[in-house]
Amino acid sequence: MTRKEHRASVDTRSVWAGEKEYRVHGATQVPVVHSVSYGYDDMDHWFYVATGKEEGHIYGRNTNPTVQSFEDKVKDLEGAKAATSFSTGMAAISNALATFLVPGNRVVSIKDTYGGTNKIFDEFLPKLNIDVTLCETGNHEEMEAEVRKGCDILYLETPTNPTVKITDIERMVKVAHEVGALVFVDNTFATPILQNPLDYGVDLVIHSATKFLGGHADALGGVVCSNDEELVEKIYHYREINGASLDPMAAYLLLRGMKTLHLRIKQQCESADKIARFLQQHDKVEAVFYPGLENHPNHDIAKKQMRDFGGMLSFAVKGEMDAVRQFLPRLEYANRAANLGAVETTVGPARTTSHIENTPEERAALGIPEGLVRYSVGIENVDDLIADLKQALSYINYTDN
Ligand SMILES: *Cc1c(COP(=O)(O)O)cnc(C)c1O
């Protein structure tokens, strides 16, 4: 193999991709360019850049070099042809939907999308006379039947939040493309290290970069990418006008975080598997949701389309919220917070985190027990995490007297 033919592994590309061409003055790191605007002395050059005929930057809402470097890294890791970024994951999702949908259109999705996404489907799209049908997550026959009735966008998220259900991407792309629908996949939980939906013909991949991509819970961001450059161009145009642009400092933090993405994901997968198996045999635990477990209903699909099973799991303890109140505050090595995908283990009841936007009735309909705990595995030593869970769970039903 010649040097040119060798494509570096995703580990190497996590470190290097998207950076070199944005460095200046020999610096080995991409600079944070805070400048809002870019000056031109040559009136013709300015005009050509402003009209997209020549390369360059005009105004920070449109483009920024630090932001572009981040976009290039994601694009490379997803194996995409184009990417554009946003101030948050929700901005990425809402802008991508708003770019293409018009009154009278129909969206088919699943009941288990991220809480904010679910709100867009339940509350905002119907107001614009866009029909949204949400199928039982994992019921592929129902999804196929709904798509065949007519569909403009099939919106998927796999694995889902918080019960980590899996949808067969390849199977759903096939039926969606038969009826001419676009397929969007929220790949936040899997990350490009574990799953590349574009390989299965998906039209648009979406990430909340706030989570695993950044990995340090210190920057908000969102990104979309595709093999269809025109599709991304349309979304970029919508975003540059609507203004949900990614801040350069956040872009830098996300870019820096992504250099260790492969290492973090490797550790988080390994630890999540051990923790899921520990919880499964614990007598205070009612149920464990992790796609790596052989008894997970979608284990085979996960095995087919993912390289490993991810760093997210959830579990229900016996005794519901009363038991959660007893044990969750006792965890030493976990932030009790509404976030996930960070280097620190992060936990929270689903009713307070991913599905805070939903009513108890809505959560019940989504199959989310009130006592469900979402556990985002950090990069701590797994034996320490298991010991910590063990001591915390021992406080269930514990009384001082
Ligand atoms: C957090 C999250 C989002 C929303 O991202 P923000 O950056 O918080 O706006 C979307 N999808 C999934 C799967 C998420 O976990």
Image: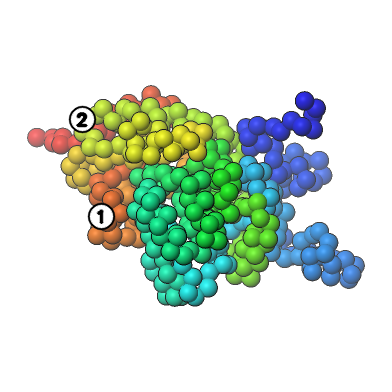
Q: Which mark is residue 283?
A: 2
* Residue 343 in the image: above or below residue 224: above
Name the quarter where the C terminus is drawn: top left
Q: Which residue is mark 1?
A: 364
Instruction: Please indicate whether residue 236 sits to the left or right of residue 5 in the image.
Output: left
User: Relative to 334, does residue 228 appear above or below in the rendering?
Assistant: below
State the image quarter where residue 55 is shown: bottom right
Quarter of the image where one finds residue 34: bottom right
Task: Residue 163: name its quadrant.
Answer: top left
In the depicted structure, whether residue 318 falls above or below residue 277: below
- For badge 1, the amino acid type reads Ala
Determine crowd level at label 1: few under 14, some 14-19, many 20+ residues with C-alpha closer than 10 A. Answer: few
Mark 2 element type: loop
Could you tell me which residue is drawn at 35 percent across and 60 percent down? 357
- The reply, left or right, for residue 347 in relation to residue 205 is left
Which of the numbered marks, if any, corresponds to residue 322?
none
Query: What residue do we see at 77% from left, 25% from top?
Result: 1
Q: Nearer the viewer, residue 120 or 69?
A: 120
Q: Residues within 10 Å of mark 2 (few under 14, many from 20)?
A: few
* Residue located at (38% from left, 51% from top): 141
